[in-house]
Image (cartoon, grey):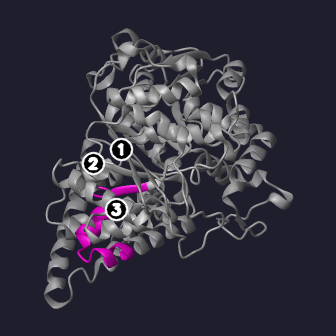
């Protein structure tokens, strides 16, 4: 523990003045708005480090972080671990709204009565079944009901946490905000809400207008703004600035902060989607082979329905042997700790040298304990891994390579205590959920083996170490990439409410660190599924290309 005055940002980082004020606030709640790339997640990690290392969050109190997406929740947890170490980070809980709601339901389930009563072994899924299976959308309303009925449940949350972080708060819905208020309003708990109103793209899900003002009034929060963008190169920042002038003129970045010509903006138009796919695959291959851009630093963003818009591109990437990840198909299985556990174990067994997998495996499996217990646990797993590697080598002499991979993985999981697995995620308190994740992990690896027969290479694709990302703009929130392609910038793609579509386009543009590409195709043939509202003849989105074209680089070829 260190004195408050002695605390400095972890890793020698320099925070802009308002970010430093936010990180060190000891009394009041905070309503912090910031643009993309301003370091919102990093500020939260630094704030956690300050609260824990100075004892402002007094032991045994904990910090609760609530995010909207699994990968954002995981990213914040990992950052806090890097900043303040595993011991202190063990008092940092990072959940999505739905994961928190499920945790409340699992702990206080008996509060629910009548038609909402749930049996001890209830499951999550479709179709709904009275008392036995609930829908994903039921989680937050049921958690609200518990907090409304039970003072004990409310007090349990309040006695556990001294601080609550609310990430990407601009997307908060009325039900989510009701949950927050029921749990924490009128208490001495410090809430830190962080977000960017220019990136609000959850309007379709009921995201509240003016949520930061409402929060500031309800929780007497101090409003602060972070202006500096640390992500994008100057040319890209100036492009973003033009969109900001329309979205929120008060947040326009000062010219002196975005001076310079670094960065690349390209705009390409094509006769048809096949020509588009072939050209993009060629350019992506060039970035990888000649510029040495890592696969995972390249993203293809699509407003809606990647499976429909990217089918030609996916085929073109496969033809060139370029690994890719279609996030629409993955459905977050890769973010599950149990899935990562299986993949890292198999990488240690069947890979040549996998130190990163070993480190991740140990971080998941070795408990927070004294040095002797930790050392003993590591030795036990080291012996197990060596024995399994030897067994796998012998198996290859008498059978096909990798033939026993699933039996090996299943045996490994059986050796891990249930307490250890539940510690990875509160969702695993329900054995059915853990079985579902394990089953989905096996199915995903089997799919990858059809594309890449060598197991170690298939596992690389699973964990996203070497794969181009194909995902919706919505899923890209909170992420950043060296090179971003926004595919299909057409009136027929961005057809929703203008304000929401403009926010979405801004989110996509602001994911790029060094290079942004926007494309359109005059003709997109109808996919075999014959989707509703599909239009083959396309026109460029005049407004969005209008933002882009003044900043197009000299290297633009089309």
Image coords of residue 342 (percent x, y): 35, 65
Q: On the rendered structure, is 251 left or right of 449?
A: right
Q: Relative to the observer, which residue lies in front, 47 or 479?
A: 479
Q: List the residue tagged with mark 1.
A: 368
Within 10 Å of the Cα at label 3, are there few (<14), some (14-19), or many (20+) other Cα atoms? many
- Which of the two discs, 3 and 2, sits closer to the camera? 3
Q: What element carries label 2?
A: helix
Hey, which quadrant is residue 19 in on the image?
top left
Asked whether residue 545 is drawn in magenta, I would say: no
Q: How many marks?
A: 3
Asked whether residue 459 is drawn in magenta, I would say: yes
Q: List the residue tagged with mark 3.
A: 324
Instruction: Give the CA distance from mark 3 to mark 2.
Output: 37 Å
Q: Is mark 3 on a helix, strand or loop?
A: strand
Instruction: Give the CA distance from mark 1 to mark 2.
Output: 8 Å
Q: Which labelled disc corresponds to residue 374?
A: 2
Question: Residue placed at 44% from the left, 67% from the top?
Answer: 311
- Which of the two discs, 3 and 1, sits closer to the camera? 3
Q: Relative to the observer, which residue lies in front, 81 or 474?
A: 474
Instruction: Give the CA distance from mark 3 to mark 1.
Output: 36 Å
């Amino acid at each position: 523990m260190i004195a408050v005055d002695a605390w400095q940002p972890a890793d020698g980082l320099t925070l802009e003045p308002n970010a430093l004020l936010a990180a060190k606030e000891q009394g009041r709640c905070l309503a912090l708005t910031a643009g993309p790339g301003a370091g919102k997640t990093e500020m939260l990690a630094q704030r956690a480090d300050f609260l824990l290392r100075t004892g402002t969050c007094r032991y045994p109190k904990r910090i609760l972080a609530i995010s909207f997406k699994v990968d954002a929740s995981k990213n914040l947890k990992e950052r806090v671990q890097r900043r303040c170490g595993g011991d202190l980070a063990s008092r940092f809980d990072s959940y999505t709204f739905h994961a928190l709601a499920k945790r409340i339901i699992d702990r206080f389930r008996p509060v629910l009565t009548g038609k909402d009563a749930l049996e001890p072994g209830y499951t999550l899924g479709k179709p709904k079944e009275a008392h036995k299976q609930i829908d994903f959308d039921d989680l937050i309303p049921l958690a609200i009901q518990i907090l409304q009925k039970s003072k004990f449940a409310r007090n349990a949350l309040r006695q556990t946490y001294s601080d609550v972080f609310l990430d990407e708060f601009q997307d908060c819905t009325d039900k989510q905000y009701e949950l927050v208020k029921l749990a924490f309003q009128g208490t001495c708990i410090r809430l830190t809400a962080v977000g960017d109103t220019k990136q609000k793209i959850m309007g379709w899900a009921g995201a509240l207008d003016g949520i930061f003002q409402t929060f500031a009034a309800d929780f007497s929060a101090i409003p602060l703004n972070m202006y500096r963008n640390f992500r994008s190169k100057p040319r890209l920042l100036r492009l973003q600035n033009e969109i900001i002038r329309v979205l929120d003129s008060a947040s326009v970045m000062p010219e002196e902060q975005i001076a310079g010509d670094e960065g690349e903006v390209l705009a390409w138009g094509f006769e048809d989607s096949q020509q588009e796919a072939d050209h993009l695959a060629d350019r992506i291959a060039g970035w990888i082979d000649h510029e040495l851009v890592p696969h995972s630093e390249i993203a293809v963003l699509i407003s809606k329905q990647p499976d429909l818009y990217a089918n030609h591109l996916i085929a073109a990437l496969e033809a060139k042997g370029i690994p890719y990840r279609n996030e629409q198909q993955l459905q977050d299985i890769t973010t599950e700790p149990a899935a990562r556990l299986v993949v890292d174990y198999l990488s240690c067994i069947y890979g040549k040298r996998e130190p990163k997998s070993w480190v991740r495996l140990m971080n998941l499996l070795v408990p927070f304990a004294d040095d002797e217990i930790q050392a003993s646990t590591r030795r036990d797993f080291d012996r197990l891994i060596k024995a399994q590697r030897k067994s796998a080598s012998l198996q290859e002499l008498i059978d096909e390579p990798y033939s026993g991979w699933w039996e090996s993985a299943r045996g490994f999981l059986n050796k891990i205590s249930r307490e250890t697995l539940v510690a990875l995620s509160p969702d695993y308190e329900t054995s059915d959920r853990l079985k579902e994740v394990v089953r989905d992990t096996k199915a995903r690896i089997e799919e990858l083996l059809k594309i890449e027969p060598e197991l170690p290479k298939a596992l690389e694709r699973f964990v996203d170490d070497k794969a181009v990302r194909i995902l919706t703009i919505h899923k890209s929130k909170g992420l950043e990439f060296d090179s971003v392609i926004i595919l299909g910038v057409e009136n027929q793609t961005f057809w929703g409410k203008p304000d929401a579509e403009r926010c979405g386009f801004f989110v996509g543009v602001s994911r790029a660190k060094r290079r942004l590409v926007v494309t359109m195709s005059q003709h997109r043939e109808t996919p075999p599924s014959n989707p509703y509202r599909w239009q083959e003849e396309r026109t460029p989105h005049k407004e969005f290309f209008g933002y882009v074209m003044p900043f197009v680089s000299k290297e633009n070829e089309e």
